Amino acid sequence: MQLKSYACCLAFLVACGPAPRGDDFGNGGGDGGNHGSSGAENCTDGVDNDGDGLVDCADPDCSGIDGCPVCGMVDNPQSTPLALPDTNQQDGSEPICTLSSQCSTANPNCVIGAPSAGGGECATSYVDTLNFIGFAQGQTLTDTSKLISVCATIEHSWLGDLQIELISPDGKNVALRQFLGRDELSEFFLGHANDCDSDSSPVPGTGYKYCWTAAAPTKMIDASHTTCGAAGGCENWDDASCDGPHDVIPAGNYQPDVAFDALQGAQLDGAWTFRVTDLWEEDNGYLFDWSIQFDPSLLTSCSGPIIE
């Protein structure tokens, strides 16, 4: 892939439908410590050991153990990696926007980056939604610390191109990774991206798993925008089959660029949207998986599906 030149030109993502979904309905909850002992649930015997009326994976004590899913978490793997190519070009003449209703059918999403990015831009994005049904009717997110994490397994050869967002059913938006502008970041990789393919014929590299959580110590990039925020800085990766070396954001947990507080009061039941927009040309990537985890105390029950 060609290295990016700092010309006044843009690109955006082709909207792709997701592959068939592998749903994790999130039964169970808690850590299930000492399960099987007196007064605690055994998660495999079909008996209500702890007297709470719930058995095995339906019991919150069994979350994440003995094969039980994690209560409150939904994982959405792609059956094949989803390409995030730069096949639609923007030339800077697209309208500046504040609302998606101001955008055209061809470029339907108003993507609002950091102030340095110069305002919102109408663009095409990759979007995927999970329709939640496991919360109480009318329930809202009154404590944003109970949005535990949003994770994605992804690779891309130029982090600075991307805006990655989570959007609530009632339209509240948090930028997990916020676009800073076309001259704000040099070349930082997500995962081991294939830097020698082309936008017309992308080839998946190796995705890294990144999680955005308020409890993480740092953001992906330090405050100076010159190195990775992880302890020890960037991973240095020399791709002998292509070019290099490259600075790679290490896999792990990071603070979102915009705090989860932006989702205060968000409606919980309904369609939660994960949106990725590539706002500059030439570099591409792949999405392999994404997931969202809420605190199980928000759910009406851990014994049934929390998404449709």
Image: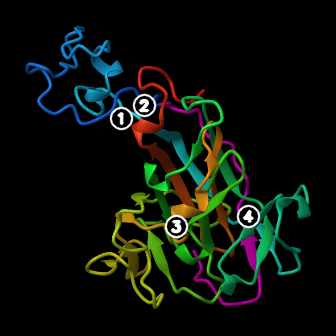
* Residue plotted at (8% across, 21% down): 37
Q: Indicate whether 282 appears above or below 204.
A: below
Q: Nearer the viewer, mark 3 or mark 4?
A: 3
Nearer the observer, 94 or 13: 94
Q: Alpha-carbon distance for marks 4 and 1?
A: 38 Å
SS at mark 4 in the image: loop
Q: Indicate whether 257 appears above or below 261.
A: below
Task: State the extent of the magenta-drawn residues as a range.
Answer: 1-23
Name the residue beneath numbered marker 2.
26
Nearer the observer, 7 or 146: 146
Q: Nearer the viewer, mark 3 or mark 2?
A: 3
1 or 3: tag closer to the N-terminus? 1
Q: Alpha-carbon distance for marks 1 and 3?
A: 24 Å
Check whether the beta carbons of the residues at disc 1 and disc 3 lie within 8 A of each other.
Answer: no
Horizontally, residue 26 falls left or right of residue 9, namely: left
Image coordinates for residue 133, horizontal then vertical, percent: 59, 29
3 or 4: tag closer to the N-terminus? 4
Residue type, numbered disc 4: Thr
SS at mark 2 in the image: loop
Image coordinates for residue 245, horizontal then vertical, percent: 37, 82
Q: How many marks?
A: 4
Residue type, numbered disc 3: Ala
Was residue 230 drawn as part of the magenta stretch in this picture?
A: no
Name the residue beneath numbered marker 4.
87
Question: Which residue in the rendered view is the most extreme toward the top?
Answer: 47
Q: Alpha-carbon distance for marks 3 and 4?
A: 31 Å
